Structure formats: C-alpha cells, structure tokens
C-alpha cells in the first residue's frame, strides 16, 4: 500500500466495485430488497442537509446512473434546482453493507426520459402525481387534499412527473464483516476513470 493509501493492485477493490454495482442493480429491480428504498439527501435552500426515503427505480452500471421519480412540485425539486449536489445512503442489515453514493442530480421533466419512465410506471404510482393541491403545502385538515380517481385525471398527473437521474461520482462501501470491518472509496473523474482506495473503517 502506498503512503497516500492507494493500493497498487486493484484486483480486490475492483471486485468490491463489481459487487457494489450488483447490489445497486438488484436493489432497483427487487421491491423487497433493502437497497430498494435508500435515503436521498439534498441541500436545503438555506444550506441545511435534508433527507428522505425514495424508491430506487434503476441503476445503470455503464453510466453509473441512479434514477428515482418524484413530483416536480416537491420541495426536493426546488432544492436540486438550487444546488444539484446530492447523496444516497443504502443499508442492507442482512448483508451488513452500507453504500453511500454522491453525485449531481439531473431533473427530467416533460422530456423523453421522463415520458419513458412515466409509461413504465404502474397505475398506483401514477396516481400520486395528480395530488391536489401540491405535495408539501400546509392544509387546514389532514384530509384536505384530493387524489385523481379516473383515467383522465390520472393521465393529467404526468405534467408533475419528474425523473431524477444522478451519475455517481463518489461511492463509499462499508462492510461490517464478522472478522473485521472493511471500507473502500471509489471516485470517478470526468473521463470515467475510477480511483479506488481502502479506508480505515
Ligand atoms: C418507503 C417510502 C418510499 C418513498 N418513495 C418516494 C419516491 O420514490 N419519490 C418521492 O418523491 N418520495 C418518496 N417518498 C416520500 C419522501 O420520503 C418524502 O416524504 C416526500 O418526497 C417529500 O419530500 P420533500 O418535501 O423533501 O420533497 C417515499 C417515502 C417512503 C416512506
């Protein structure tokens, strides 16, 4: 190991990265996977950290893109438009594995990517985008809002549908191994070259 902590032989680190990409992919595909519902963090308009659970819809290992869906009217969209730096935290208690992914989020609203994602969405997912008034607004009573109930008004919700796509530029892997914890970090440059290092857990 070099003085700066870099490891000359990346064979083990590259295996860690392959395994990390696999759990992200299966997390997106498997509704029961712990990695299906990570914590997504953005920066509030005043700079404070804000986080919430989202449903991971896709991980594309070639582009390193994480995708989830949200309402264009939601607070997080305003936060991302203000500052696109975001992070995702995943934890699977059975695997004892935490992943933290950082990147810059891109918002797809009323474009080809959001249209494709909308088409692939289930009816029960589409319903949420027709909520009136907008999510996050203060209401007098707990049930002072309406959800669309017919085909036409559910379809109209597409105008609020937004796909959030984040290319991962930093991935940190932490495994709570029985015989000792292991921690590694991977950083990609603008050309897509990755640099992996082991970290003290
Ligand atoms: C299991 C679970 C899954 C969720 N999935 C999503 C999601 O995919 N997209 C989303 O915008 N909000 C999702 N939410 C709601 C968010 O956690 C959050 O409450 C909401 O989006 C408002 O966040 P905001 O005000 O920061 O924009 C989910 C909540 C839970 C508990």
Image (cartoon, helix red, strand yellow):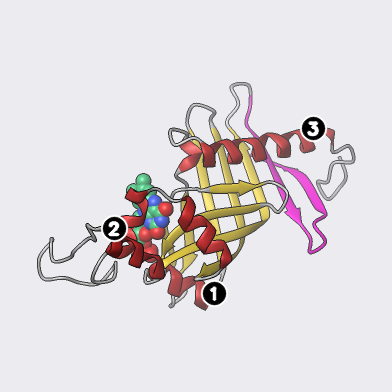
Mark 2 → mark 1, Cα distance in angstroms: 36 Å
Circle 1 sits in a helix, a strand or a loop, which is it? loop
Q: Would you say 152 lies left or right of 112 here?
A: left
Residues drawn in magenta: 180-201
Circle 3 sits in a helix, a strand or a loop, which is it? helix
Q: Which sits earlier in the primary sequence, circle 3 or circle 1?
A: 3
Q: Which residue is mark 2?
A: 151
Marks 3 and 1 in Cβ contact (< 8 Å): no
Residue at 20% across, 72% down: 138
Q: Which residue is mark 1?
A: 83
Q: Which residue is mark 3?
A: 12
Is the residue 124 above or below the residue 102 in the image?
above
Residue at 60% across, 26% down: 177
Q: Position of residue 145 (x, y in %)?
A: 17, 65
Q: For the C terminus, which image quadrant?
A: top right
- Nearer mark to the viewer, of 2 and 3: 2
Is-magenta flag for residue 43?
no
For ligand 1, tell me if the residue under mark 1 lies within 8 Å. Answer: no
Which one is nearer the viewer's eye here, 2 or 79? Answer: 79
Residue at 47% across, 31% down: 93
- Nearer mark to the viewer, of 2 and 1: 2
Q: Which sits earlier in the primary sequence, circle 2 or circle 1?
A: 1
Q: Quarter containing ligand 1? A: bottom left
- Binning the other alpha carbons within 10 Å of mark 2 as few (below 14), some (14 to 19) or many (20 upward) gives few
Q: Quadrant of residue 136?
A: bottom left
Which one is nearer the viewer's eye here, 197 or 79? Answer: 79
């Amino acid at each position: 190991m070099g003085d700066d902590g870099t490891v000359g032989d990346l064979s083990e680190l590259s295996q860690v990265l392959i395994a990390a990409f696999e759990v992200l992919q299966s997390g997106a595909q498997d509704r029961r996977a712990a990695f299906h519902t990570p914590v997504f963090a953005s920066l509030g308009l005043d700079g404070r950290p804000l986080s919430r659970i989202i449903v991971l819809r896709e991980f594309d290992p070639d582009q390193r893109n994480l995708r989830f869906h949200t309402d264009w009217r939601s607070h997080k969209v305003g936060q991302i438009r203000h500052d696109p730096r975001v992070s995702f935290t995943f934890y699977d208690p059975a695997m004892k594995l935490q992943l933290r992914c950082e990147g810059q989020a891109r918002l797809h609203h009323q474009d080809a990517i959001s249209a494709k994602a909308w088409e692939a969405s289930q009816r029960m997912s589409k319903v949420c985008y027709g909520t009136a008034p907008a999510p996050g607004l203060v209401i007098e009573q707990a049930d002072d809002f309406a959800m669309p109930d017919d085909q036409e008004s559910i379809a109209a919700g597409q105008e609020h549908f937004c796909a959030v796509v984040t290319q991962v530029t930093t991935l940190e892997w932490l495994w709570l191994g029985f015989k000792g914890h292991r921690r590694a970090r991977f950083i990609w440059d603008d050309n897509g070259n990755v640099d992996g290092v082991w970290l003290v857990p």
